[in-house]
Image: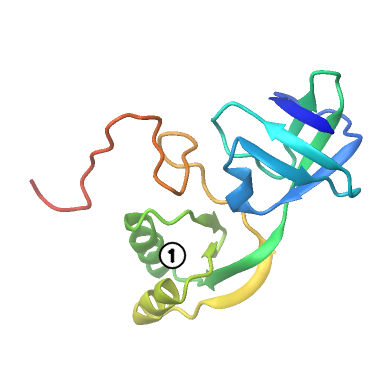
Amino acid sequence: MLKFTKRLEVAEKARYTLTLPFDQRIRGRLKVILDNGEEAGVFLDRGPILRGGDCIATEEGAVAQIKAAVETVSTVRSDNALLLSKACYHLGNRHTPLQIGEGFARYQHDHVLDDMLRGLGLEPVCEQAPFEPEPGAYGEHHSDHAHGGHSHEHSHGHAH
């Protein structure tokens, strides 16, 4: 079984590909099935999220390129930058991993969040698409609120 233990700083020619959903790309250790059907293990130090296009390697030099899997997401689109900014603010205030692009915002499908955005006047569309959320203002972090053992205090927009 191949054991991928290193993140590569620069993409290299990969012999293998590994397609993973976001929830698996945030983990450092997992058993996987490469796209060719071969079993492998990923044993990386905790750190940055694996992104589509990133490469990982074994100690022996075998390289796999990461692909973001198509998964169930909700996407809101709007030409109204203020409305889309408000949507991003409210989603971010709930610590929702969020992909932001020109005229759209995307998050892992959640009917409660869909309803919240409908209340703002947007119409979320549930679809199948790769999910590549923003890394966050302080670098990569995990959606389960693992913050490396340090205190995590911040304001949620309330005056103090």
State the residue position of label 1.
81
Q: Relative to residue 30, is residue 113 depicted above or below? A: below
Task: Give how far across and how far down residue 21 sits, in percent.
Answer: 66, 54
Can residue 63 be seen at all in this image of the molecule?
Answer: yes
Can residue 132 be seen at all in this image of the molecule?
Answer: no
In-image side of 12 versus 90 (left or right): right
What residue is at 46 percent from the left and 34 percent from the top? 139
In-image side of 85 versus 4 (left or right): left
What residue is at 36 percent from the left and 75 percent from the top? 116
What residue is at 7 percent from the left and 46 percent from the top? 160
Q: Relative to residue 72, is residue 137 depicted above or below? A: above
Q: Amino acid at mark 1?
A: Ala
What residue is at 51 percent from the left and 77 percent from the top? 124
The N terminus lies in which quarter of the figure? top right
Please rate how many residues cluster around mark 1, counting C-alpha atoms within 10 Å: few if below 14, some from 14 to 19, many from 20: few
Q: How is the image coloured?
A: rainbow
Q: Relative to residue 5, is residue 144 depicted above or below? A: below
Task: Give how far across and how far down residue 117 sits, in percent.
Answer: 40, 75
Task: Give how far across and how far down residue 44 sits, in percent.
Answer: 64, 28
Camera-nearest residue between 49 and 30 = 30
Q: Relative to residue 115, is residue 27 depicted above or below? A: above
The residue sitting at the left extreme is: 160
Q: Quadrant of residue 3?
A: top right
Count every numbered label the image shows and give the total.
1
Q: Quadrant of residue 51?
A: top right
Q: Classify mark 1: helix, strand or loop.
A: helix
